[in-house]
Amino acid sequence: MRRRLTAFLACLFLGASLAANAGPAEDRKALTEHYKQRLPGVKFEDYVLGALALNKDALDQYESIMIFPPFVNDVDEGRKTWEKPFKNGKKLASCFDGGGKNVAGNYPQFDNASGKVVTFEGALNACLKANGEAELKYGSTVMGLLVSYTKSLSDGMKVNVKVEGPAALAAYEKGKTHYYSRRGQLNFSCATCHIDNVSNFVRSEQLSPMIGQAAHWPEFRAGTELTTLQRRFQQCNSQTRAAPLEFNSEEYNNLEYFLTYMSNGLPMQTPVFRK
Amino acid sequence: MRKKSTLMFALIAGLGTANLSMAVEGAKEPAGRTVAFNKAKGNCLACHAIPNDPKAESPGNIGPPFIMMKERFPDRNKLRAQIWDSAVANPKTAMPPFGKHQILTEQEIDQVVEYVLSL
């Protein structure tokens, strides 16, 4: 009898934990299946390449540019910020495990204390604040270059975003709702283009799959034009005549949380060139 | 010459938009085509190929190509409704609701309809 009860309770517990985790894992599985069907010739790891994975010529061009990336000097500017000692003698690296190597793929994280999503940029600023240093402006060049360097320390790390607990799940769900909601005069959702129409062409631009999209930032467009992930959100919003939101706004952070979760398991490429 | 164009203008104004295709016949660029090609207006080329129009370069392929449109849309109103709000026919559509969201004016939609029917 006792054994039975234990088994019953175990089942209940298992059921409950499955139900609690079902959302994100199932969403990811369903999307992975969708892309497998729509992009039969593309290897899963190559989703990180975005639209380049769909076009051999563009990929060849990309690879030849990445032999001597035009943005090495920019990234080196970011290294200087990373290595600059605080007034208390510590450095940014002191706030991260392993001196900041292979940590960026763990972001965004849900912070239960504040009830908010913290991006990697947010973690860098939290470190500055905790050490009595001035925070950097979100969306600024100095922040973007710092992230370019610090993410380069996680090049190849597998994206590993966790959604644990009801508050984290709620933030994930908000990001997901944003992704699937139509907005602006042209009435597009992100999903209209990157899920429903993946690999189709908008004029001469081929649409990349959303899985992999969050794993390769920042980008240096046209060689040296620094573009962060949230800047890209703003660009996609503006191009479809929807109002772009603020950097580090709760809504964009939730969107980044949802989007990055979908790239879980993929090796990061940071930073990269894009045309 | 001036008299002629005044007359023409009166004709267009008088007949309204329904006979626009007749009025612009012989003109260099049909109004509907300008609206359809303009990126800030119809931008139809973002998604539709126009195989019979040599100027329709590097189109997207999100929507079906404009071809034999008169045959496929014997009912002009149906074509207009598709452009005015494509979500009525397909709630999951990728096509913007040009009339409903006032991306184009009613007159511009009529012009585009004429152009599309000519393809």
Image: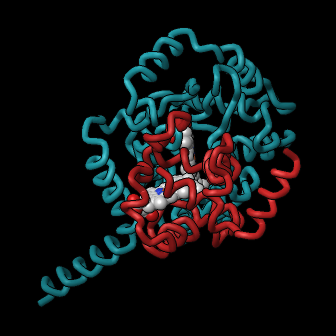
Chain letter of the cyan region: A
Find residue A83 and report its horizontal and vertical position in percent. Answer: 73, 23
Q: Would you say residue A110 is visible in this rendering?
A: no
Q: Is residue A275 above or below residue B58?
A: above
Residue with the most extreme top position: A68
Chain that is coloured red in the picture:
B
Regarding residue A65, the answer to whether it shows in the image is yes
Q: Position of residue A7 (x, y in %)?
A: 17, 80
Viewer-closest of B114 and A80: B114
Quarter holding the C terminus of chain A is top right
Q: Which residue is at the front of the view, B20 or A104?
A: B20
Residue A206 located left or right of residue B68: right
Q: Which of A164/A236 is in front? A: A236
| Residue A35 sits above or below residue B16 on the image | above
Query: Where's residue A201, x and y in %?
Result: 46, 41
Residue drawn at the location 28% of the way across and 47% of the way down = A36
Q: Residue at x 62, y 48 (%)?
A: B33
